[in-house]
Image (tube, rainbow, N blue to C red):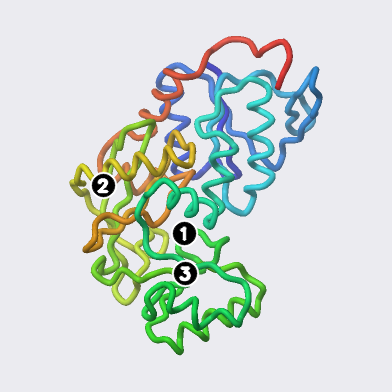
Amino acid sequence: MKMAILSRDESLYSCRRLREAAEQRGHFIQILDPLSCYMNINPASAAVHYRGEPLGHFDAVIPRIGTPITFYGTAVLRQFEMCGSYPLNKSAAITCARDKLRSLQLLAREGIDMPVTGFASSPDDTQDLIAMVGGAPLVVKLVEGTQGIGVVLAETRQAAESVIDAFRGLNAHILVQEFIKEAQGHDIRCLVIGKQVVAAIERAAKEGDFRSNLHRGGKAHPVIITGQERDIAIKAAATLGLEVAGVDILRAHRGPLVMEVNASPGLEGIETISGLDIAGMMINWIERHAIPGHPPKTAG
């Protein structure tokens, strides 16, 4: 098969592993910077051009689109979809997952439990917003934040009011969320491919922090998940339409809570800790679902 990876940095571990896994299985694979792609939006001859040349047909496209370029990156992916390429994750699903507010609303609609979450705009709502999520301590998150950036733990009501008002003063969209104390700075990352959790690790925040992200200095180790945790991870990924997802779960007294669903989960931490060939599993999924050959005569 002919495959493409959409990524701005081909040196990243995930890109290198996906390329290795594809080449080991005899596939041709090319890494494309999505910002260097441009599109001919034409019902009769839709095409993607790259650095001055039209790209031929790709049987499959693996999106590794960073959050800052979600809008343009998903537009490029959508164009590949129009041209008949199989996307490992669809553009619409990535857009949905990157919108934290929308994704939480969809998860809640499907009955997937999560920390109590509030969202508001007016500064006059601060008092009631804090009460809505059970008071302090609570977590304030930037809607556009990623990898633990823009996430603040407010331990007192006064601190919560100050943080919320400060973010609003910057015209930032924020979520205010219940703090799950019993999780003790730990969470579980479940890697979902299709309707299966193929790997799971438990992440622990570094001392003095509550964010368990490995990018923020957190540590990780293998973990055995429960059937309930497995089911909720699979359901969360399916609810957002993702074939591949990293589902982050907190262990609370009332049961597992979905904290976030990542549409482009990093592979380094989970492959290193689990010892599993996750990249190979992703390529195998493409082999099972993409149809090799020529694009349709008309796109769209």
Mark 1 residue crowding within 10 angstroms, few (<14) / some (14–19) / many (20+): some
Tell me residue 240's x, y (percent): 48, 42
- 114 in relation to 190, above or below: below
Give the quadrant of residue 210: bottom left
Q: Which of the numbered marks, if any, corresponds to residue 270?
A: none
Tell me residue 161's x, y (percent): 50, 85
Determine the residue located farthest toward the bottom in the rendered image. Answer: 158
- Measured in 3D between alpha carbons, the distance from the residue under mark 2 to the one under mark 1, in whole angstroms, is 22 Å
Q: Secondary structure at mark 3?
A: strand
**Front-lying residue, 98 or 270:** 98
The mark closer to the camera, 1 or 3, is 3
Q: Secondary structure at mark 1?
A: loop
Residue depicted at 65% across the width and 27% down the height: 80
Please state which amino acid type lies under the numbered disc 2. Answer: Glu
Q: Which residue is mark 2?
A: 229
Q: Which of the numbered marks, if any, corresponds to residue 151?
A: 3
Q: Secondary structure at mark 2?
A: helix
Q: Which residue is mark 1?
A: 147
Q: Is residue 83 left or right of residue 174?
A: right
Tell me residue 223's x, y (percent): 20, 49
**Front-lying residue, 252 or 153:** 252
Q: Is residue 219 left or right of residue 139?
A: left
The mark closer to the camera, 2 or 1, is 2
